[in-house]
Amino acid sequence: MDKQDEKYSISRRQILGGAAATLGGIATAPLATAAESNPANLPPNVSEWTPYLGAGVDANPYGVPSEHESHVIRRNVEWLTASTESSVNFTPLQDLDGIVTPNGLCFERHHGGVPEVIPADYRLMINGLVDRELIFTLDDLKRFPQTNRFHFLECAANGGMEWRGAQLNGCQYTFGMVHNVQYSGVKLSDICREAGVKPSAKWVLAEGGDSAGMNRSVPIEKILDDCMIAYSMNGEALRPEQGYPARLVVPGWEGNMWVKWIRRLEFGDQPYMAREETSKYTDLLPNGKARMFTWVMDAKSVVTSPCPEKPMIAKGQNLLKGLAWSGRGKITRVDVSLDGGVNWQTAELHGPVLSKSLTRFTLPFVWNGEEMMVQSRAMDETGYVQPTIDALQKERGVNSIYHNNAIATWLVKSNGEVENVRLG
Amino acid sequence: MFALVNLNVKFHLVLALGAAGIVIGALAVPALAADRPFNLGKIATAEEVAGWDIDVRPDGKGAPVGSGTASLGEEIYAERCAGCHGDFGEGIDRWPVLVGGQGSLQTHDPVKTVGSYWPYASTIYDYIYRAMPFGEAQSLSHDETYSVVAYLLNMNDVIDEDFTLSNENIGAVKMPNRDGFFLPDPRPDGQPKGGPCMKNCQVSTKIIGRARNIDVTPEGQ
């Protein structure tokens, strides 16, 4: 057992207690994962789907992905939580291109399950230090001026299992608590004007209508700067698991604050110190003290191919793909290393490059079967550089759970297999 | 961001002047309409606000009238809470541990409980009333909630068994880890000196850990 492994006694006990059948890696049989072809469908033969009529319109009134893409799904880690109603699953970043996360693949994090909110009975209440305490219907919200913006939403605990070492062998499980969609909704500054916020109001308590009554305090400056109440994502109504019919959007800040199924905004002169901003989402340091109100999601990036789920299947020309994002603004540069961080080259950024949004990068490369240690390093417009895990551990130890935005390492073996490893 | 706050204040000043200008011969309704840029939504009644405004702040603001004791809370806890949290707050399976952990925050395996970590008693009330028991939100009465909070505080040696916890004193309860948190956020941190290195960087490329060896990854495919 090496230096890292000995720290995992808790995880081992948990896995032995419940999920022994799930042991095992993901990426096996490298250089043979390309599906076998049927010569009858290949040139010069006429492919079996060519001569006959296919399904007509309305075969799927709401379209679904090809059956051959059934592996592209959200996944959870059962041993992490006590129940699926208070749990999380992960976006399959390794199977996506561009910067938009399809609605059905956006990771979920619930604290009391998904409430079945009836839109006609939905209400948003504004109370506290305002000139007028108001109640809006969903139709009221949709009559406000509209704003449309792409933003990433990342759970502050994304990568939280990796503080002490490489633990989960997958891009999805180590980076998948993030998604990126276009939100349509109302600027909170407009709602604030409608209610008439008193000068003494410094904090806003956002509260959900779910069984957890999720509540978080947001400073008024952020509320007025760029927060919104969203009712649509990627052009359609919010999915139930993403807050239908309305959620708070807090661009660049930790996902826990983006209260779903939002039912109330209370304006006050002090923070409310809810459970989620005291006992959770605070970052414990080695000296026993904890950082509080660590809202911003610092710049981060991940190579989504190759990765443990996407082994190298062929030598020669290949394409490295990845995603980068920053809660402080736009991504300005992403560097990639194939040798464990000794030498770096700058990847190509693909537009649109938007503030507080996922940004796609690629790097074409030739692989001759040599072992590689793949890393990526994002930089944003504030000059922030995505740190190494060593640098973060030096500042914060290994028990802070949240805000692990360190550079990860994928070990590409000569047989094409890819593993999540820790260098040191 | 502060510019926006100032704009907002200025906006109200302008509107106040505008409203004053039409006071002659006008009643409150048109003035109010002018003050609301969109005239959307309806005014909430006090009763409507009271039904949804359930939060409790550290200073006790928002705490509903009521009281309870640890003695009364013990029975409620056994019936409504112990199924997940255990008879002694030890936590069953992966459900949260509620008791103990004092002195563990600096160790390799910190145990964050109400007693060892939570900085405010108000948060316990706020959370239990709004979210507990799990799947039976807002089903405890206010008095029952005060009693359960008192029981948890007593199990963590914060208050005596016969202490009557109420809306009058919940803001004054001093939690053991009250001073265990600090502001403001000190980030950004962990930044490389002299900017990002590009060539022949002095880093270790020795593999010291492999996720595959940890072997806790679901198969999932």
Image (cartoon, coloured by chain):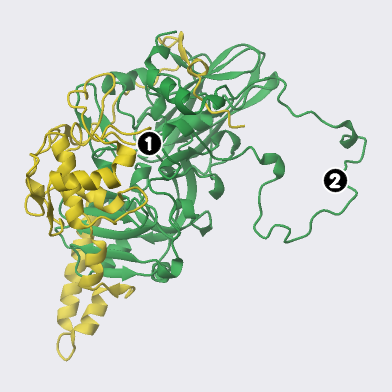
Residue A396 position, x and y percent, is 28, 23
In the rendered image of the structure, the colour used to display chain B is yellow
Residue found at x 35% / y 22%: B195
Left or right: B61 in relation to B132 = left
Residue found at x 29% / y 30%: B188
Picture quadrant of residue B26: bottom left
Q: Identify whether A130 is placed above or below B180.
A: below
The chain that hosts pointer 2 is A
Residue A193 position, x and y percent, is 27, 66
Residue on which the image places disc 1:
A381
At label 2, the amino acid type is Trp
Residue on which the image places disc 2:
A49
Quadrant showing the C terminus of chain A:
top left
The chain that hosts pointer 1 is A
| Secondary structure found at label 1 | loop
Left or right: A318 in relation to B35 = right
Left or right: B60 in relation to A244 = left
Q: Nearer the viewer, residue A278 or A128?
A: A278
Picture quadrant of residue B150: top left
Q: Identify whether B36 is placed above or below A356.
A: below
Residue A362 position, x and y percent, is 57, 31
